[in-house]
Image (tube, grey):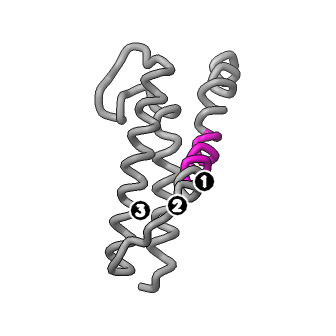
Amino acid sequence: MTNQYPIYILLCLLIIAANLPWLSDKLFCILSIKRKPGWLRACEWLTLCALSFSLGFALEYKVMGTVVSQAWEFYVVALCLFAVFALPGFIYHHDLKKIFQQR
């Protein structure tokens, strides 16, 4: 297995993790809640973001043997990329879900 495959797997997991708060009405896909408010979805999204970044650090350490230190710009870009990954789930939850329920 080359170094490319774990990166592709991680990107797929990041896309799934970024969309989970908006695609599921359960908290972390485990606890059933009658109505999940927006602030709880945002907290869940930030928690999944932190867990995903931790998984990325662990993968980097496993593949490379060390974790390269980054400046704050890297983390801002990574957070923005995670927000872009969450866009399909956000659009589905706030726009498309209502349209599909009306049909």
- From this view, report whether residue 4 is shown above or below residue 71: below
For disc 2, the neighbor class at 10 Å (few under 14, some 14 to 19, many from 20) is few
The N terminus, quarter of image: bottom left
N-terminal-most mark, 1 or 2? 2
Q: Which residue is at the front of the view, 92 or 38?
A: 38
Question: What is the chief secondary structure element of the magenta stretch?
Answer: helix
Q: Of discs 3 and 1, which sits in the foreground? A: 1
Label 1: element kind: helix
Label 3: element kind: helix
Q: Amino acid at mark 3?
A: Gly
Residue carrying label 3: 56
Q: Of discs 2 and 3, which sits in the foreground? A: 2
Residue 14 location (% of width, % of height):
49, 53
For disc 3, the neighbor class at 10 Å (few under 14, some 14 to 19, many from 20) is some
Please tell me which residue is depicted at 64% across the width and 24% down the height of the picture.
94
Asked if the residue under mark 2 is in contact with the one under mark 1, i.e. CB atoms within 8 Å, the reply is no
The C terminus, quarter of image: top right
CA distance for labels 1 and 2: 11 Å
CA distance for labels 3 and 1: 14 Å
For disc 1, the neighbor class at 10 Å (few under 14, some 14 to 19, many from 20) is few
Q: Which mark is residue 71?
A: 2
Please tell me which residue is depicted at 39% across the width and 39% down the height of the picture.
47
- From this view, report whether residue 4 is shown above or below residue 82: below
Residue carrying label 1: 77
- From this view, report whether residue 52 is shown above or below residue 20: below
- From this view, report whether residue 54 is shown above or below residue 103: below
Q: Amino acid at mark 2?
A: Ala
Please tell me which residue is depicted at 38% across the width and 64% down the height of the picture.
57
Which residues fall within the magenta stretch? 78-88
Please tell me which residue is depicted at 36% across the width and 35% down the height of the picture.
29
Q: Amino acid at mark 1?
A: Val
Number of dots carrying numbers:
3
